[in-house]
Image (cartoon, coloured by chain):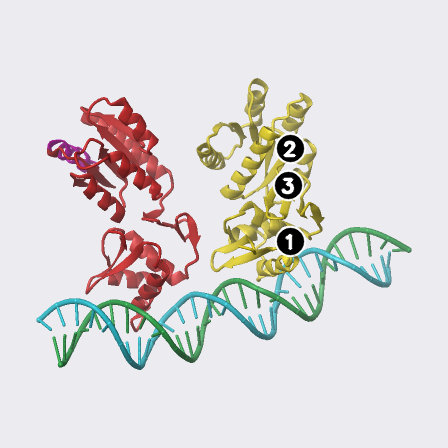
Chain colours: A yellow, B red, C green, D cyan
Amino acid sequence: MRLLVIEDDALIARSLEQALSPLGNTVEVFTTHGEGAAALRHDRFDLVLLDLGLPDGDGLELLAALRDRGDTTPVLILTARDAVDDRVSGLDHGADDYLAKPFSLAELEARVRALLRRSQQRSDNRLRYGRLAFDPATGTASLDDTPLALPRRELLLLEGLLLHAGSIAPREVLERRLFGFDEVGSNALEVYVSRLRKRLSGTGLQIRTFRGLGYRLEDAAA
Amino acid sequence: MRLLVIEDDALIARSLEQALSPLGNTVEVFTTHGEGAAALRHDRFDLVLLDLGLPDGDGLELLAALRDRGDTTPVLILTARDAVDDRVSGLDHGADDYLAKPFSLAELEARVRALLRRSQQRSDNRLRYGRLAFDPATGTASLDDTPLALPRRELLLLEGLLLHAGSIAPREVLERRLFGFDEVGSNALEVYVSRLRKRLSGTGLQIRTFRGLGYRLEDAAA
DNA sequence: GGGAAGGTGACAGGTTGATGACAGGTGGCG
DNA sequence: CGCCACCTGTCATCAACCTGTCACCTTCCC
């Protein structure tokens, strides 16, 4: 798989490269939109990781131009945490998924795998675990294919748990996912865990606590 | 840096030692695969120089066993002749590089430096011992790559033991690590050793007491 | 045997996580 | 605007777990 990373922060670019290369991918890095656009015109990639917030231009234009040419290469957008607008307009402009900084490498890998899988087999990139699924494209969770109406925070929590499906989602990661850097001043995370637990009761799924570490989504049957 | 040399030819072993020690490394030499394997089970090295053609066993098996344990210590293979087969299967079995005898010391040094640099840069300064690993970056311990939920004090103790992997961790060092200068007024260390032992039971690892000295983490199999 | 070092079960007190309740906020709708 | 339903973060309270201590036992060594 050939991946193209368009990201100006050398540190982030490097960690992306180091995370994705071991999965058997060739990773190409460019630090400006101009270079990235040129690469996309002359070359074929299986996935593009695009940072919108680069100094030299509008990432959305790059994306729009790509789609106008009929190029359907999957694009995963990287945005700063609070830029919800970016995310939405990114998806509008034809992005396939988004990732808010800061993100964990596990999260990144999960998304990249999902996108690559989809582009290979035309299957969807929904995150699944047991009877649960989460579709990043529409931002909706579902249980047995029937949509779940979850409040925003609980949705974020569920998504965070699904991204770490099978392993423990660290407290800090979940906290950052729900509250960003807003430094919520109490046991808010526990509250949302509790609320989500209540909703999951009867679904055969449960959230297990790992003291000092975090939480893990589990099949109650196990 | 700690280097392990497994090589039966005393002359070669000596010249390896003499070439590598001046670079600031501690070099341990063993002349059989059996001894080398034992050393690798009980101790942590930054690099292993492994001669495949030893009379007492198959070096590839040693290498395979090492990787099966999840040990990613860099291994540089030495082979007698320009045996391409050995080289290929060595790399297949998880070796990081290969050197054919006879080799120049300059070449050896260059390869060793490259491997050490790479392993350092891997920012993977996890401590390992057998199936156990501890990542100082996240402050988490794991067994076979699944995180262990350990209370703080037991985690500190485990970390202390891993820091001295292969050798005896002195009592006072461990006490200082667990309790700082708080001068705990009883047999608290023994209590935590006992608790950690209980948790390690069934993992194939054990904590052995050295009266008047301290404790050492050991592979129960040995 | 006797003394010293270490091992371990039990316990009180502290800390972390879980959960119900509540007040303020937000957005829809007349 | 006023009402209502619902989402959010905080707190009080409770449960689970961690921590250090002690008592008493085992092991080692003379």
Q: Quadrant of the N terminus of chain B?
A: top left
Q: Are marks 2 and 3 in one subunit?
A: yes
Q: Are marks 1 and 3 in one subunit?
A: yes
CA–CA distance in space, label 2 to label 1: 24 Å
Q: Camera-side residue: A10 or A157?
A: A157
User: Which secondary structure dominates the residues rendered in magenta?
Assistant: helix
Residue A66 on the magenta segment? no
Mark 1 and mark 3 residues within 8 Å of each other at the beta carbon: no
Count residues near mark 3 (Cα–Cα under 10 Å), then give few for <14, some for 14-19, many for 20+: some
- What residue is pinned by disc 1? A154
* Mark sitting earlier along the chain (2/3): 2
User: In which image quadrant can residue A116 be found?
Assistant: top right
Mark 2 residue type: Ala
Mark 1 residue type: Glu
Residue B168 in picture, x, y percent from top left: 23, 56
Chain identifier of the residue bearing label 1 in the image: A
* Mark sitting earlier along the chain (2/1): 2
Would residue B47 be found to the left or right of residue A157 on screen?
Answer: left
Q: Are marks 2 and 1 in one subunit?
A: yes
Helix, strand or loop under label 1: helix
Instruction: Give me the residue at 24% from left, 27% from top.
Output: B99
- What residue is pinned by disc 3? A136
Q: Is residue A51 visible?
A: no
Residue B18 on the magenta segment? yes
- What residue is pinned by disc 2? A95
Count residues near mark 1 (Cα–Cα under 10 Å), then give few for <14, some for 14-19, many for 20+: many
* Mark sitting earlier along the chain (1/3): 3
Bounds of the magenta segment? B11-23
CA–CA distance in space, label 2 to label 3: 11 Å
Chain identifier of the residue bearing label 2 in the image: A
Instruction: Give me the residue at 44% from left, 34% from top.
Output: A22
